[in-house]
Image (cartoon, rainbow, N blue to C red):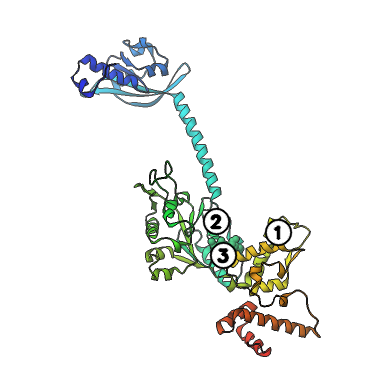
């Protein structure tokens, strides 16, 4: 076959040039028909014949003869382009674009370009299927990233806790950044979820990220995603980041104090510009994400030591919520125990209808002297454990895990059996004396420790001193 190059065509004969343009028109994937100024068909390509069902015999004849309804000839007069005109011949449907051909400001003909509707139907169908699939994926994603807790499920009446709940409820439905502080297991994520569910973002994703659990080198691409070929082993087509997943919802940045200094700078930029850039890409993407950060660390201290960026700290710390440790709100323990006991029983599918499961008063009292280093999470796990261990319907000291009871001075003092006394008063006083002594031994003997012991006992410091004197309890 003869080959043309641009150089050949410019210097070749007029016939050759015409061949060249014809060859181009023939190779086009849409149907093309050209008429001259007289309305005579000068050129059609095979695709045109296929789509419209016309035969090559129309070439050289007036278009109006073979296709009486054709609008193309009108264009020779009004010079107006037409786009997306629907045509039907027999059962063939197609869409036509038409335009005048203008040379030196004069109309010398007109061209019609058509696409079969079969094709359009096919594409529409494909698009619809893709759209449905996308919708399904989005639904699946939302169900993966859902917040379960609401404010109603936050148990506790302690003042310290209530203060935090009050602030959280006030700012839940705003876009203000929040910083939640508190020891591990105090309920930081619970608060974040409750706030998300109390905002207009509640039907969009809640995406928790534990910044301490993801290696620093990976965290950036986890948060912001990466573009194709960003690094070796990068997935084809790149990867979406958690910020993009959280779009229109909330991202919960847990253990933010553990984020690397470099990444802190990038996070600050995201907060300020509301745009993210995937690793290895230059394009920026708009995002609309509410940020709730949490840490068990003292961020202000980290700022002083130059481990946490001061600018980011002030940016995040617009609203700060502090959740007190469980040992400072032991008044909430009975209610928490009760709720966890019920849910534990439901999880174990024990027979709820006929039996009333409880915890013995002694055991509950012991739980109020324990320090709970793992806070509410530890209490919850402990109840789960005890529910499994319990024989009968009541949780007793011996059903508690050893890790909790091993530090007790004398377990027998909490045994459920009672010795005989001469009077009720004697029994009460003896129990009181032993319980106070036990608690003091546990907390220690200096002022601060006595204050905490009094708190655990549910009495004032003054009362505790009175009792120490009365029972001669100083040790
Ligand atoms: N006030 C509370 N009421 C009910 N459950 C709580 C409360 N505080 C914490 N929990 C439970 O304790 C566990 C730990 O809470 P989480 O929010 O994960 O703590 P953190 O994020 O501070 O480590 C969860 O199972 C949570 O449901
Ligand atoms: Mg947590």
Report if the beta carbon of the residue with label 2 is closer than 8 angstroms to ligand 1.
no
Q: Is residue 18 left or right of residue 148?
A: left
Q: Which residue is mark 3?
A: 185
- The image quadrant that residue 369 belongs to is bottom right
Q: Quadrant of the C terminus?
A: bottom right
Residue that appears at 20% across and 17% down: 12
Q: Which residue is mark 1?
A: 345
| Mark 1 in CB contact with mark 2 (< 8 angstroms) | no
Badge 1 marks a residue whose secondary structure is: helix
Against 91, residue 144 (above or below) is below
Give coordinates of residue 164: x percent, y percent.
Answer: 53, 67
- The image quadrant that residue 326 belongs to is bottom right
Residue 458 visible? The answer is no
Report if the beta carbon of the residue with label 3 is closer than 8 angstroms to ligand 1.
yes
Q: Quadrant of the N terminus?
A: top left
Question: Nearer the observer, disc 3 or disc 2?
Answer: 3
Q: Which residue is mark 2?
A: 197
- Real-space Cα separation, disc 1 to disc 3, in angstroms: 21 Å
Q: Is residue 358 left or right of residue 13?
A: right
């Amino acid at each position: 076959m003869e080959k043309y190059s641009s150089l050949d065509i410019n210097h070749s004969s007029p016939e050759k040039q015409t061949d060249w343009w014809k060859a181009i028109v023939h190779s086009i994937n849409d149907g093309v028909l050209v008429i001259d100024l007289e309305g005579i068909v000068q050129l059609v390509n095979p695709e045109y014949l296929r789509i419209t069902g016309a035969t090559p015999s129309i070439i050289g004849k007036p278009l109006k003869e073979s296709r009486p309804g054709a609008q193309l000839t009108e264009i020779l007069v009004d010079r107006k382009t037409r786009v997306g005109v629907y045509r039907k011949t027999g059962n063939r449907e197609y869409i036509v674009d038409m335009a005048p051909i203008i040379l030196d400001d004069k109309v010398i003909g007109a061209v019609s370009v058509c696409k079969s509707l079969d094709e359009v139907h096919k594409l529409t169908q494909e698009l619809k299927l893709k759209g449905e699939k996308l919708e399904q994926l989005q639904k699946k994603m939302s169900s993966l990233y859902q917040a379960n807790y609401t404010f109603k499920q936050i148990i506790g009446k302690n003042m310290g806790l209530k203060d935090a709940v009050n602030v959280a409820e006030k700012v839940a439905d705003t876009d203000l950044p929040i910083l939640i502080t508190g020891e591990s297991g105090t309920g930081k994520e619970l608060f974040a979820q409750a706030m998300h569910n109390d905002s207009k973002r509640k039907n969009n994703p809640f995406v928790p990220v534990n910044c301490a659990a993801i290696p620093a080198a990976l965290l950036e691409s986890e948060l912001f995603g990466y573009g194709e070929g960003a690094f070796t082993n990068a997935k084809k087509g790149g990867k979406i980041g958690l910020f993009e997943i959280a779009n229109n919802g909330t991202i919960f940045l847990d253990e933010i104090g553990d984020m690397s200094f470099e990444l802190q700078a990038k996070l600050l930029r995201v907060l300020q510009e509301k745009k993210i850039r995937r690793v290895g890409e230059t394009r920026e993407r708009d995002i609309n994400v509410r940020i709730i950060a949490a840490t068990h660390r003292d961020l202000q201290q980290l700022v002083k030591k130059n481990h946490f960026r001061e600018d980011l700290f002030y940016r995040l710390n617009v609203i700060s919520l502090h959740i007190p440790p469980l040992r400072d709100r032991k008044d909430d323990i009975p209610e928490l125990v009760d709720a966890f006991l019920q849910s534990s029983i439901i999880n174990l599918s024990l027979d709820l209808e006929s039996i009333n499961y409880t915890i013995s008063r002694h055991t509950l009292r012991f739980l109020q002297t324990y320090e709970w280093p793992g806070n509410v999470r530890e209490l919850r796990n402990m109840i789960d454990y005890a529910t499994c261990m319990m024989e009968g319907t009541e949780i007793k000291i011996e059903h508690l895990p050893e890790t909790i009871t091993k530090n007790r001075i004398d377990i027998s003092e909490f045994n459920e059996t009672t010795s005989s006394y001469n009077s009720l008063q004697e029994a009460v006083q003896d129990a009181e004396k032993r319980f106070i002594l036990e608690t003091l031994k546990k907390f220690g003997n200096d002022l601060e420790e006595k204050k905490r012991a009094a708190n655990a006992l549910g009495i004032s410091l003054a009362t505790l001193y009175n009792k120490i004197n009365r029972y001669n309890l100083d040790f």
